[in-house]
Image (tube, rainbow, N blue to C red):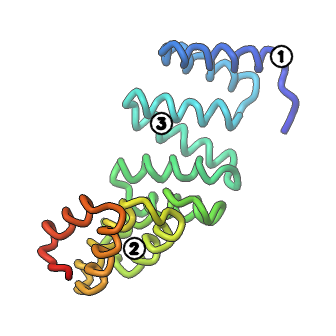
Amino acid sequence: MSRRPLSYWWLKLVAMACLTFGRRERALEIFDEMLRIAPEDAYALASQVHVLAQMGRSAKALAVAQALVQAHPQGSAGHWFNLAFLLQEAGRLGEAEAAFRQAVQIDEELDRAWYGLGLVLIALQRFDEAVEALKRNTELQPMSPYGWYQLARVHVDRQHPEEAQRIIRHLEGFEPKVAAQLKRETGLLVS
């Protein structure tokens, strides 16, 4: 990483202050100024993605996220995750899958990327692959009900009700409301 001039660091502080006080538009302008000083700066680009997404400017956020991973392809798994999330939100599932896979290649313990990959694979009706992604998510986040819930749903879709029942029993031990919801939605009886 190259050295940044003092003006870059000053702009970074001002941008953080703007965000603290809810001045998102001004923060975006400052990130642009930072990029003029340090083109392809990962911090400024990632910050723009975050702020633009918060403001509901998904198309612009997606474009900046793509520029970020293009500039730093082996950079942060989080950058790839954010791109994948935006692609998934835009319905570009094939591209989202590739970006989620890149995120877990960089950091195989990024549980939310495994979860996102699972959701994309479900949407693509590639249930066997979705099971593998969701199993990895539940290994990394065993107490989070989200991966378990989706995994049970996939097992029902794959015509494996006994696996879904096993998950429901598991969820009853720490997330009884989610277990009850799955019982209602699937019609499965669990003893």
**Residue 60 has which mark?**
none
Q: Residue at x 45, y 77 (%)?
A: 132
Measure how far apart labels 1 and 2 are at the Cα level.
48 Å
Q: Which residue is mark 1?
A: 6
Q: Where's residue 126, x and y in %?
A: 35, 76
Measure how far apart labels 3 and 1 are at the Cα level.
27 Å
37 displayed left or right of 62? right
* Helix, strand or loop under label 1: helix
Q: Which residue is mark 3?
A: 61
Q: Residue at x 44, y 34 (%)?
A: 53
* Helix, strand or loop under label 3: helix
Q: Residue at x 35, y 73 (%)?
A: 170
Q: Residue at x 68, y 45 (%)?
A: 71
Q: Nearer the viewer, mark 1 or mark 2?
A: 2
Q: Which residue is mark 2?
A: 130
- Up-down: is 54 above or below 137? above
Q: Would you say the residues marked 1 and 2 are in contact, meaning their CB atoms lie under 8 Å apart? A: no
160 displayed left or right of 140? left
Amino acid under label 1?
Leu
Q: Where's residue 74, x and y in %?
A: 70, 55
